[in-house]
């Protein structure tokens, strides 16, 4: 049995706290390192293995950085507003504030038991008035800048969560939170103008050290598309409309145009005899989701309006159709259809017997089977014949521009961020609606607009605040007349879009943060959290940083320089942990049994950090045994070092061997841990531990040397098993704390394990013998052989035809 246990954890946690070991010193001359883990939602469940995997392992990384001389800042807090607490209140009658506070207290306790270097004095909790006052301030600033606005729009509605959702919260047509089918509702809502930053949000992705996949996902989500807007006039009318196209080179191949059913022009363009068919079609289209409408494979539907449009490049008349494969919310809600070169148009034209006219051949000039969607050379396009797609795009836009019938245009898939929610448990939107003055922002001096405690939670699609008279009735800050407060609250993603700024100056009661402090502490050097935030939190936070920069509050462009996503820890059954499946792992029980370092080290050793995997009780047992083995070795070491009886002073073969493992481990653990490859780091520590045990079996020990090696061993182990290592460090009589020690550096010469003698033959005759390190590669041996003075002399003026290396024995040089 090991002496290491939870009692050791508690002992050192107490001491670390008493001595304020991890307190962040603003005035330190060391380089700051801001390490951040995505803060957690204080849900009813306890701290789970997934939190541990994120926070505990990043803490180990940060501990190494501390020992490497960085001034580490590692704050912790809670993303405490949100739907689950409110849904829980509806179910149980327990107020969200009460349940949230209780959960936070529990989680704080559990987080402390982790023994991480959290800077608790910098904690933020987003549901406190001290915090949300500044979330409201952020809203006011965005409003002032025209980056927050209210509009009526068809928005996503989750009938089960009883609230609107942002586009980012709709996954394959369902609610990101509860998986209910999302419907569309025409509602007046608040939006943040994230689209104003679309271009920079794409461009700056390339400056970030982020997982490739996440960068690709954000790029795709923002969806930059370069093309042209082309104006089609309506025949026998003074109406016209624009289409967005990425293939203006195919303009001569347009055989019809299509409007989205929701396009405002549809009614005006529909002739009386087509009215009833178009009406029926519009009603049908309402039932389809955008996702369904976009599926290429789906059977095409549509109907003719009876009107014609005029192709601006050749004057040809083309029929105007209505079809749901054109979305109202993208581009202009209208497209020019080129069935010869677009798959959806091809399917549509085939079904409705519309003409298909080839205008692009392959680059080699050959006619390809239709639809041919690649770039090529123009045909049947009058003056543009023979031009490549690339050139024709430029020339055709020039020609259209000269007639004011077209311009180059960039489109984005990204939509403005819908931030209002019809729910209670969030930051109230700080505006007042006045009959005389319209929307009036609450003056900054009146913030926070406090969330009232006594409200009714019955879910009916309206914010509970709307029924709270004391809250809702107020006076207009502008004219003093009776007025009503906004009843909606802010999406919790607004709270989390700026929390990393507040951490650095969390007690500031005059400002959201002091710019000088934030500019010094940010960007975050290392951010770690789940990949599910790729197109939500990680996008919103980037936008808010840029907006605050442009208002002069920040002097950096990006909040998170380097990002890692940890993998997911699954139940022993390989399934995602959930209470209902009964496959959850409760860290507390394991910590009780093994101590937190064993729990932490198992998470490190058992999984690739970015992949995760299924929990295994055997796995944690084997790590517990490893700690036990180390402890036994260290006991023997201490005995040897203190008794000193058989001490020798020379460095012989055995010492060299152990020294090799020592430096080899320093090298690989430093490299691997840097990249958060904790599993291989622990594997190297196991090798080192084996080498140590082997040395201890020697009869004669160099105890001075042994002490040095053991100290390094513990320094390397300290980030992975902080409590255990601190204990062992003190048992060895070293001074407190091991975390004030420097991280060991490796000596390359110690890595040259031993040398071997290799004979060098020239044309079959031995001409030299060289001594090289036994771990050299063939290429390195070759270089060493040819560099030998005797070999040089014997090959001078001759042509080296071939060099054959028989590893560890012989090099044969063939010369002519
Ligand atoms: C004519 C054309 C010819 C097109 C051709 C493509 C190929 P991305 O890349 O996604 O931006 N489009 C434009 N607005 C649309 C809408 N509201 N709903 C559905 N489709 C729409 O795609 C742009 C292309 O998608 C545009 O270029 C347009 O079809 C279509 F050989 O115009 B194209
Ligand atoms: Zn007023």
Image (spheres, grey):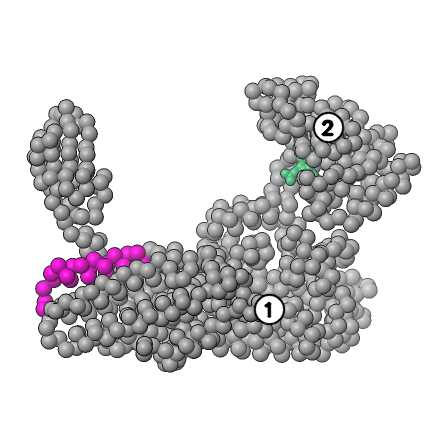
Taking the image as drawn, is residue 87 in sight?
Answer: yes
| 162 relative to 774 in the view: left or right | right
Q: Quadrant of the C terminus?
A: top left
Considering only order in the chain, which callout, 1 or 2, is on the residue closer to the N terminus? 2
Residue at position x 69%, y 47% in the image: 291
Placement of 252 over or under 31, stated as above or below: above
Q: Find residue 266 and report its image quarter.
A: top right
Q: Quadrant of residue 23?
A: bottom left
The percent position of residue 163, horizontal first and vertical second, equals 72, 62
- Give the number of the disc on residue 254: 2
* Distance of label 2 from label 1 (alpha carbons): 56 Å
Residue 309 place in picture, x, y as percent: 80, 30
Residue, far right: 272
Q: Return the residue nearer the eye: 428 or 90.
A: 90
For residue 457, which quarter of the picture?
bottom right
Residue at 78% x, 24% y: name it: 316
Element assignment for label 2: loop
Residue 431 visible in this rendered orientation of the protein: no
Placement of 522 over or under 816, stated as above or below: below
Judge left or right: residue 760 versus residue 122.
left
Which residue is denoted by mark 1 in the rendering?
A: 580
Question: Which one is nearer the viewer's eye here, 22 or 401?
Answer: 22
* Prevailing secondary structure class for the magenta stretch in the rendered image: helix
| Image x and y of residue 257, in percent | 76, 33
Q: Secondary structure at mark 1?
A: helix
Question: Magenta residues?
Answer: 648-670
Q: Is mark 1 within 8 Å of ligand 1?
A: no
């Amino acid at each position: 049995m090991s002496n290491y246990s939870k009692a050791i954890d508690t002992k050192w946690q107490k001491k670390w706290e008493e001595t304020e070991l991890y307190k962040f010193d603003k005035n330190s001359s060391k380089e700051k390192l801001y390490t951040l883990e995505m803060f957690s939602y204080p849900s009813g469940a306890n701290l789970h293995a997934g939190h541990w995997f994120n926070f505990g392992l990043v803490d180990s990384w940060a501990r190494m950085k501390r020992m490497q001389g960085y001034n580490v800042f590692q704050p912790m807090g809670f993303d405490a507003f949100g739907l689950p607490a409110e849904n829980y209140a509806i179910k149980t009658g327990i107020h969200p504030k009460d349940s949230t506070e209780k959960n936070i207290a529990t989680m704080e306790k559990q987080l402390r038991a982790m023994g991480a270097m959290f800077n608790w004095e910098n904690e933020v909790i987003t549901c406190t008035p001290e915090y949300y006052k500044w979330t409201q301030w952020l809203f006011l600033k965005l409003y002032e800048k025209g980056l927050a606005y209210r509009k009526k729009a068809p928005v996503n509605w989750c009938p089960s969560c009883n609230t609107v959702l942002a586009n980012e919260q709709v996954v394959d047509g369902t609610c990101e939170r509860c998986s209910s089918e999302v419907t569309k509702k025409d509602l007046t809502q608040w939006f943040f103008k994230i689209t104003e930053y679309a271009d920079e949000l794409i461009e700056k992705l390339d400056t970030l050290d982020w997982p490739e996949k996440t960068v690709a996902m954000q790029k795709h989500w923002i969806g930059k598309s370069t093309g042209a807007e082309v104006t089609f006039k309506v025949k026998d009318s003074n109406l016209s409309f624009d289409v967005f196209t990425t293939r203006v080179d195919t303009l001569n191949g347009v055989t019809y145009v299509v409007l989205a059913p929701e396009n405002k022009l549809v009614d005006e363009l529909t002739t009386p005899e087509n009215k009833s068919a178009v009406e029926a079609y519009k009603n049908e289209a309402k039932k389809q989701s955008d996702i369904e409408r976009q599926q290429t494979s789906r059977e095409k539907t549509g109907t003719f309006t009876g009107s014609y449009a005029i192709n601006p490049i050749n004057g040809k008349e083309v029929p105007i159709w209505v079809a749901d494969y054109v979305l109202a919310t993208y581009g202009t809600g209208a497209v020019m259809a080129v069935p010869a070169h677009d798959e959806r148009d091809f399917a549509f034209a085939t079904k409705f017997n519309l003409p298909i006219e080839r205008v692009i051949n392959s680059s080699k000039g050959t006619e390809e089977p239709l639809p041919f969607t690649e770039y090529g050379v123009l045909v049947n396009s009058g003056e543009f014949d023979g031009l490549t797609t690339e050139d024709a795009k430029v020339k055709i836009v020039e020609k259209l521009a000269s007639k004011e019938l077209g311009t180059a245009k960039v489109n984005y898939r990204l939509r403005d961020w819908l931030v209002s929610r019809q729910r209670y448990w969030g930051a109230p939107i700080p505006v007042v609606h006045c009959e005389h003055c319209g929307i009036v922002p609450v003056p900054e001096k009146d913030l926070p607009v406090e969330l009232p405690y006594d409200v009714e939670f019955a879910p009916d699609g309206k914010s509970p605040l709307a029924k709270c008279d004391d809250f809702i009735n107020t006076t207009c800050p502008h004219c003093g007349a009776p007025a009503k407060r906004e009843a909606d609250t802010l999406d919790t993603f607004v709270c989390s879009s700026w929390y990393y700024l507040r951490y650095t100056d969390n007690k500031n009661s005059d400002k959201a943060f002091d710019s000088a402090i934030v500019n010094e502490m940010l960007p975050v050097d290392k951010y770690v959290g789940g990949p599910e935030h790729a197109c939500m939190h990680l996008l919103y936070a980037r936008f808010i940083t840029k907006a605050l920069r442009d208002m002069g509050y920040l002097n950096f462009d990006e909040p998170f320089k380097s990002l890692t996503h940890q993998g997911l820890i699954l139940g022993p059954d390989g399934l995602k942990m959930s209470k209902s499946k009964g496959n959850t792992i409760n860290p507390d029980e394991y910590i009780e049994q093994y101590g937190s370092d064993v729990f932490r080290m198992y998470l490190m050793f058992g999984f690739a950090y970015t992949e995760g995997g299924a929990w295994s009780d055997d796995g944690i047992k084997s790590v517990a045994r490893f700690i036990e083995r180390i402890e036994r070795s260290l006991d023997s070491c201490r005995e040897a070092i203190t008794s000193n009886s058989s001490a020798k002073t020379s460095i012989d073969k055995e010492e060299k061997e152990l020294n090799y493992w020592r430096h080899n481990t320093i090298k690989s653990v430093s490299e691997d841990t840097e990249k958060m490859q904790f599993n291989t780091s622990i594997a190297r520590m196991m090798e080192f531990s084996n080498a140590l045990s082997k040395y201890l079996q020697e009869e004669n020990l160099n105890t001075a040397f042994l002490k040095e090696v053991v100290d390094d061993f513990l320094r390397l182990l300290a980030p992975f098993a902080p409590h255990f290592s601190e204990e062992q460090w003190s048992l060895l009589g070293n001074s407190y704390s091991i975390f004030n020690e420097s991280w060991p550096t490796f000596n390359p010469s110690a890595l040259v394990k031993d040398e071997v003698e290799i004979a060098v033959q020239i044309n079959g005759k031995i001409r030299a013998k060289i001594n090289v390190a036994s771990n050299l590669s063939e290429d390195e041996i070759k270089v060493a052989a040819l560099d030998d003075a005797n070999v040089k002399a014997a090959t001078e003026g001759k042509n080296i035809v071939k060099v054959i290396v028989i590893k560890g024995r012989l090099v044969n040089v063939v010369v002519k």
